[in-house]
Image (cartoon, rainbow, N blue to C red):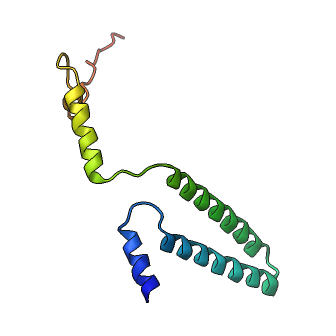
């Protein structure tokens, strides 16, 4: 029961947690076992294709998790501090960055052609 609680808490924790990684590996192992069993029983090319797709998906997810672990995830407070620092460093002349994001682009005037 402790693993289920730990897995539930990992949903609210940024980044990959050990409980989440255990659940990820376990679910893919069970998927591979079921696909190997279906290939053995049915000898269908469709299950072989599904196994290849599942292997590629597993490799991609593991690669993404490894890339995510390389980056230092920031808390909301750190992100807010960075945002305030950028606002203070913005030049006063010209259009401010925050104001330009909220405005809609101006449409070009329509010219009529003479035929």
Residue 1 appears in the picture as rendered: yes
Does residue 93 appear to the left or right of 47 in the view shown?
left
Q: Indicate whether 78 appears above or below 106.
A: below
Q: Horizontal and vertical percent for residue 68?
A: 50, 54
Q: Indicate whether 35 appears above or below 71.
A: below
Q: Indicate whether 18 appears above or below 33.
A: above
Q: Indicate whether 69 appears above or below 54.
A: above
Q: Horizontal and vertical percent for residue 16?
A: 48, 63
- Quarter location, residue 57: bottom right
Does residue 43 appear to the left or right of 114 in the view shown?
right
Q: 101 or 43: nearer the eye?
A: 101
Count of labels shown? 0
Residue 101 appears in the picture as rendered: no
Report the residue at 81% width, 84% height from top. 40
- Quarter location, residue 47: bottom right
Quadrant of the image for the C terminus?
top left
Does residue 68 appear to the left or right of 106 in the view shown?
right
Does residue 60 appear to the left or right of 23 in the view shown?
right
Q: Horizontal and vertical percent for residue 14?
A: 39, 61
> Quick one: which residue is furthest to the bottom in this view?
1
Quadrant of the image for the N terminus?
bottom left
Report the residue at 77% width, 72% height from top. 48
Q: Horizontal and vertical percent for residue 17?
A: 47, 67
> Quick one: which residue is furthest to the top in this view?
114
Report the residue at 50% width, 70% height from top. 18
């Amino acid at each position: 029961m402790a693993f289920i609680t730990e897995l539930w808490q990992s949903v609210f924790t940024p980044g990959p947690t050990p409980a989440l990684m255990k659940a990820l590996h376990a679910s893919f192992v069970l998927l591979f076992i079921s696909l190997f069993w279906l290939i053995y029983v049915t000898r269908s090319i469709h299950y072989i294709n599904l196994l290849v797709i599942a292997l590629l998906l597993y490799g991609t997810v593991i690669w993404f998790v490894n890339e995510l672990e390389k980056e230092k995830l920031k808390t909301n407070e750190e992100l807010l501090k960075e945002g305030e620092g950028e606002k203070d460093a913005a030049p006063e002349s010209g259009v401010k960055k925050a104001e330009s994001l909220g405005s809609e682009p101006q449409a070009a005037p329509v010219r009529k052609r003479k035929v």
